[in-house]
Image (cartoon, coloured by chain):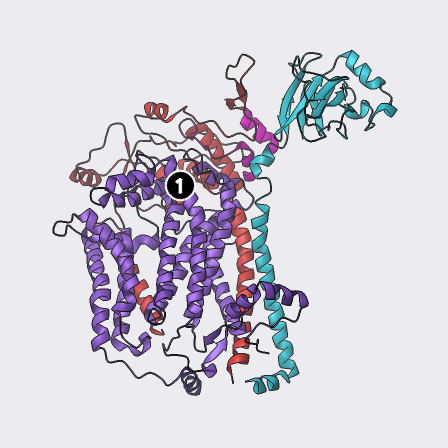
Chain colours: A cyan, B red, C purple
Amino acid sequence: MSTSESSSEDHGGEVKRRDFLYIAAGGFGALTAGSMVWPLIDNLNPAANVLALASVEVDLSKIEVGQSILAKWRGKPVFIRRRTAEEIEQAQAVPLDDLKDPQTDEERTEEGHEEWLVMVGICTHLGCVPQGTKVGENRGDYGGWFCPCHGSHYDTSGRIRKGPAPRNLEIPAYAFLDDTTIRIG
Amino acid sequence: MKKTATILASLVIATGLAAPALAASDKADPISPPGGWSFQGILGAHYDREAAQRGFQVYKEVCASCHGLNQVAFRTLEDIGFTEEEVKAIAADYFVPGDPDEFGDPTERPAIPADIKPDPYPNEEAAAFANNGAIPPDLSLIVKARAGGADYLYSLLTGYRDPTEEELAHMAEQGLAMPDTAYFNPYKAGQVIAMAPPLMEGIVEYAEGQPEATVEQMAYDVTTFLAWTAEPKLEERKEIGFRFMVLLFILCGLLFFSYRRVAKRVMDH
Amino acid sequence: MHPSRSFEPKNGFVKWFDQQLPILTVLHGALVAYPTPKNLNYWWSFGSLAGFMLAVQIVTGIILAMHYTPHVDYAFNSVEHIMRNVNYGWLIRYVHQNGASFFFIVVYIHIFRGLYYGSYKAPRELLWMLGLVIYLLMMATAFMGYVLPWGQMSFWAATVITNLFSAVPLVGDAIVTFLWGGFSVDNPTLNRFFSLHYVLPFVIAAVAILHIWALHIPGSNNPLGIEVKGPQDQIDFHPYHTAKDLFMLSVLLIVFMGVVFYAPNYLSHADNYIPADPLVTPAHITPDWYFLPFYAILRAVPDILFIEAKLAGVIAMFAAILLLFALPWLDKSPVRSGTFRPLFKQFYWLLVIDVIVLGFAGARPAEGAWLIAGQVGTVYYFVHFLVILPLLSRIEKTRPLPESISQSVLSKQASA
């Protein structure tokens, strides 16, 4: 068996043609297998109905000054507070040196709409929902929000002031469609 | 095993001969529209966008009062060529249940593109009551849920007519009579249908520049639309399919020659 | 060039690993150095193809289960959610739906190959019976999978098939209530079917491993049906069969994916796109094509003596399958391959035609000519196995067998 085997190996052209054939078959085989694998992975990404709700529109017209509401966006709570003049002043007056995660209040609100504070309501520590949105809830030492899980205090601009949380409450991408409607996401 | 081919071939012929005798004959075979469907075939199969949009108009103005479309989110209408703004406007015409208000009472809000069109009836009982006991089926999947598919629906919509004497006699033979609350349609199984002829000349007015809204045109359009609602991924499927099949044919050829080469190498001595 | 008989890794890590857990040695023995008869034809590739189809069904099934909801209120809509919203959901679902059919096509060819070449005969009886166990498990799995989309056909298939058990005397109704977990096919039924549909394929995979194990003890049968005499009759599985099976796999994929992309609903029934309605039975209910011959047998049997037709039909249907377990002892002809059995060969093709006729009869309402065809077909099916095969093994004059496989291969090449 092996003698005639090695004699056919001696024909250089034969070997090259064969190698080319095998490489081509292997290449196309890999391409086919690869294209079959992709749908098996991509189906785990968010489906079209999930993506369709990736942005929501919120009507702000019913929120009184000093009131907050809780909106839901991508399955997460969003805090929307219509701040009082006092609260805005307080937030703007804080020197950056006092902050763990320095950010001015202007950076955290839309120009011309400073009254509105829109934040993802998830504590940057370990993902609890801080209190301070509903009436009567503990607003913490700085008049903003207080996370009951591990005692993080946020101010009236949603910045971390005391406690273990490393960063300020996250501001989602949002835009004012008109004076009383925003689109989040 | 060489005989296999001959035997299988004769079987195929035998079953082919037997087939006409098998066809259940209490309804007419559906017909295709002249020119066929844009979404047939292998290459370039697509839903005619203008027909599908006109079809949506027919659905909305004629069918929607009785038939739901409960698998189809408004947002997907963009797939047949409506713009985002148009879809928003279409959705906003409908009201869907909203969150409870501060008193805990149910509310309604205008639909958004992510919503599904609310059903015309709150429940099956209401649907049956409003339609002499016949529940109008949801149309989302109707083209796939009926043997004959798009041809069947087109035939049904254009096939209303009075029964001939012969047909009446045939029905009488089977102990059936035309009920007062139903209509004759040769394409429907049993040839009797509870739905009144839904399409008639002038029931829908198409926008300027569009073809005239004849019964055949409306049937063609609404069937195209409902073919899309039944199988929205058809274009993607056929296009990806074609590319994948080309790949497979090349691979198959390469593997055949590789196999022959291997066989020669290990067998021929 | 030829792989060595035993696995001898050069890499140090592989050597270390394999010494402690010789998985690679086992795989090498099964997929590389497994000695096969030199004369296997293309029909022998269908075992590998069946393994591939099982893998396809398991992989696509696991993914579908991530998006599917087994509840009567949501099942139908969740399948439509897969078809409309999930990325490539339509593709995965159509592959799984048609994959069941193609799994059966491949397995039926595999079974009929075994029937023609006498692969069930000693020393491979257990191999044959393990194959039948896989087949039975496949039927159960396919049936329960068909119920999951919760369309009209799903619901009524579940109702009709589970009602078969009501034919059991005395305890029939209790069994059916037990199967349903209620007084009709409902949410508890759907839930348990989903659970079993998920787990049974893994049982199939386990039995398939036993099936392959039992194959590797005596080695493969071959078209001549004679024993391997020595290494000159054999060839290693790799590269010859790996190349051949890969080619056959690509052929299978062309047909399979052709159906998936261009006629994905051809093999199924339009009524299953109507949500299940427990108050309305569709005009014609038929099982999927791969059950049709057995469905025809079920309906073919009339009252027999004191056994009423319903029970007799159920007995006949189960007997038709269980009969195959006794096949190695019904056909006692010492010659395996149909090639050398002129009479057997003719009856074999008659059986093939019979099963196809039964299939057509099963698809038609049980009345008129098709009922008679179903009854004649049923009688022939049992006569074939219970009368003809035992008789043939006594009276048939078989043709002379070749000396050896290698000789036969050589003479074929000479004549060609």
According to the image, label 1 marks what residue? C192
Q: Is residue C297 visible?
A: no
Is B125 situated above or below C53?
Answer: above
Determine whether the residue tagged by mark 1 lies in a helix, strand or loop. Answer: helix
Q: Is residue B216 left or right of residue C354?
A: right
Task: State the residue at coordinates (46%, 75%).
Answer: C36
Q: Any magenta on residue B79?
A: yes
Q: Chain of mark 1?
A: C
- Residue C117 in picture, x, y percent from top left: 34, 72
Q: Any magenta on residue B126?
A: no
Instruction: Check disc 1: other Cα within 10 Å, few if <14, some if 14-19, many if 20+.
Output: some
Is A182 situated above or below A18?
Answer: above
**Which quarter of the rendering shows the N terminus of chain C?**
bottom right
- Residue B35 in picture, x, y percent from top left: 44, 48
Q: Can you tell which quarter of the image residue C355 is in?
A: bottom left
Q: Can you tell which quarter of the image residue A139 is in?
A: top right
Q: What segment is highlighted magenta in the picture? A: B64-92
Check disc 1 and give the amino acid type: Arg
Is B117 situated above or below A136?
Answer: below
Task: State the residue at coordinates (56%, 74%).
Answer: C6
